[in-house]
Every structure is written in C-alpha cells, then in structure tokens.
Image (cartoon, rainbow, N blue to C red):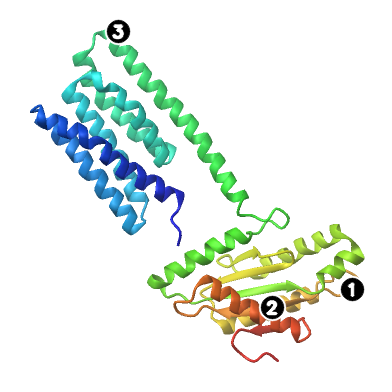
Amino acid sequence: MKRTSEEYILITLSLGGSVSIIPFAIFRMLNGEWLVAAADSAMVVGMFVLGVYVYISRQLQFASMALAILAVSGVVSVIHLKGFALLYWVYPTMVGVFYILAPSTAFIITSIGVIALVPALIRDMDIVAFIAALMTLVVINIFAYVFASKMHEQSKQLSLLIRKDPLTGVGNRRALEEKLDEYTASQQRTQMVASLIMIDLDYFKNINDVYGHIVGDQVLIKLTEIINSRIRISDNLYRFGGEEFVIIAVGTPASSAETLAEDLRNMIESANFLPDPVTISLGVAEYQKEETSESWIHRCDTALYEAKSLGRNRVCLADELCQ
C-alpha cells in the first residue's frame, strides 16, 4: 500500500525534529550544560526512534501520542533548566501537537504542558510579565483548539465527499480501491475469505435514450436502494462506473456470494422500475491467496463480461463455466 500523508507528516516531524535538535545538544555538551544536553539528547533519540517505528510499522496512533508527549515534556524540561528565554519554543510545539493529534487530545496535552511551565515562569519573571506570558499561552492554546476542531470537522466532511458517489450516495471508485487495498493488505494477518460481486445494469443506454437521463438516474438510485436492502451491514457497495456497481462481501465464500447475486438479480427483475423490464448481469469472484486487488477485480469483471456475452440477466462465477 502507498504511504498516507499522515505517515509522511509524522515521519518528517520525527526525523526532522531529531536532526534539528542535534546541534543544540552538541552545543550544550561543549558548554558543560549536561542536564540540558541530556534533555536535548533524549528528544533526539526519542524522535528518531519514533520516526523509524512509523516507517517500519506504519502504526500512527501510538507514535503520534508519544511524539506529542515527548515534544511537550522536552520543551517544558528545557525551559525549567534554562529559563523563560526559551519560551518561544512552546508556540511551534503547540502547533505541531494540534497538527498530529485529535483536537481534544492535543488540548489536554498542551494544557498540561502550560500548567507545568507555571513554576518556571513564576521563578524567572515579575508578576506582570508572568501574567502576560501565561495569558498568551492560554489564548493561543484555546485558539489552536478552536481552529483545529473546525479544520478536523471540515476534513472529515471532505473525506466523506471525495469517497462518495454524489448521485446514489454509495462509495465511489476511489473508496472501492482503498477498501480493496486495505483488505488485500490485511490478508496476511486475518486470512478472512471475501468475495466481489460486480453488477452491470443491462441496456442502460437504451433506458436513457427512451426515458431520458433523469429517469435513468432514478433507476440507478432505486437499484442501489434495493441492493442495500438485501446486503448485510458488513458488506460494502460501491459505484464502479456509470451503470456498474461492486459489492465487497467480507466473510462470504463464492458459493454464498453467488446465492446473494441470484437474489439480487431476481429482486431487480421483479421490481417494476419501468414499463419495460429492468435486469442486471453479475460476476462473482472469491479472493485468492496473495492476489492483488487489480487481479481480483479483473477476474470478477471477466465473469461479468461472460454473463453479458451469454445474453445478460444472469450470474457468472469467476474461473468456472457459466451456463
């Protein structure tokens, strides 16, 4: 699978942060500031290890939390040791924490960091400067939380939109490809059986030509409603092309998927969409061990093509003779 943008961001922040702190650690050592050098060195090693961990394991949740805690605790420790002159490091650290964690989690961690800074700020500042610095940190933390929450919500909505077919409301081809990649990647661990069912609406061009595209759209919407009423919650329906749809039925062998396909074919044929009968052709393919998602789709598409070439309105099973 391709690396996600989240992986690249976390790897860049971890390894980039580690490299950027090395000169400071060396400088502290040369000046005999051993405690500060130890704090810097701990951040260098910790960030480097987390970057390598993400690169190898591709696990983000633990690494994101660990990186945030490491960065905040490191900055707090250095300010306690060196004084408020290094307070400016808190601001980019806050931004980074909100960038890699959910807003609520980031707010908790940064708030704890601000509270932990209070003793050092009181020690080194007069009361006016202390209040000003503290209020600045609090306001920035609140603003960062509000902004991150808004962006997080918009990102979720955008993510849904770019993976959803606007007409039928089911997943689009992009969502299908991501789900297939996810399933084939997980096969090395789960070994769970799954089948694809590819559906093509027979003579859809004729429907558009005779009844118009608006009616054609309504037929597609009704088709997805019928399919969704029959498949399980754990099954996933996607619009693959204009009048083609794909069902991913996890935990379903080919024999059961073929039965499901026949049920769908009968339901559509008897649904009375239009004065003329509406039918579908279907291809079924069970996942084969170590098969790529492209190969899986291709075998299912070949079965669908065979169903159409034999007269349509039928189900064909991949790699088997179709009657």
Q: Residue at x 38, y 70 (%)?
A: 189
Judging by the rendered image, the residue that carries numbered circle 2 is 282
**Residue count near mark 2 (Cα–Cα under 10 Å), binned few <14, some 14–19, many ≥20:** many
- Mark 2 residue type: Leu
- Earlier in the chain: of badge 3 and badge 2, it is 3
What's the CA distance linking mark 3 and mark 2?
Answer: 75 Å
- Quick one: 309 or 257, which is closer to the camera? 309
**Relative image position of residue 246 (x, y in whole percent):** 64, 69
For label 3, the SS is helix
Judging by the rendered image, the residue that carries numbered circle 1 is 276
State which quarter of the image contains the N terminus. Answer: bottom left
Judging by the rendered image, the residue that carries numbered circle 3 is 128
Q: Is residue 266 left or right of residue 84?
A: right
- Earlier in the chain: of badge 1 and badge 3, it is 3
**Relative image position of residue 206 (x, y in whole percent):** 87, 70
What's the CA distance linking mark 2 and mark 1?
Answer: 20 Å
Residue 68 seen by the camera: yes
The answer to whether 38 is drawn above or below residue 238 in the figure is above
Q: Residue at x 22, y 39 (%)?
A: 43
Q: Residue at x 58, y 85 (%)?
A: 255
- Quick one: 51 or 278, which is closer to the camera? 51
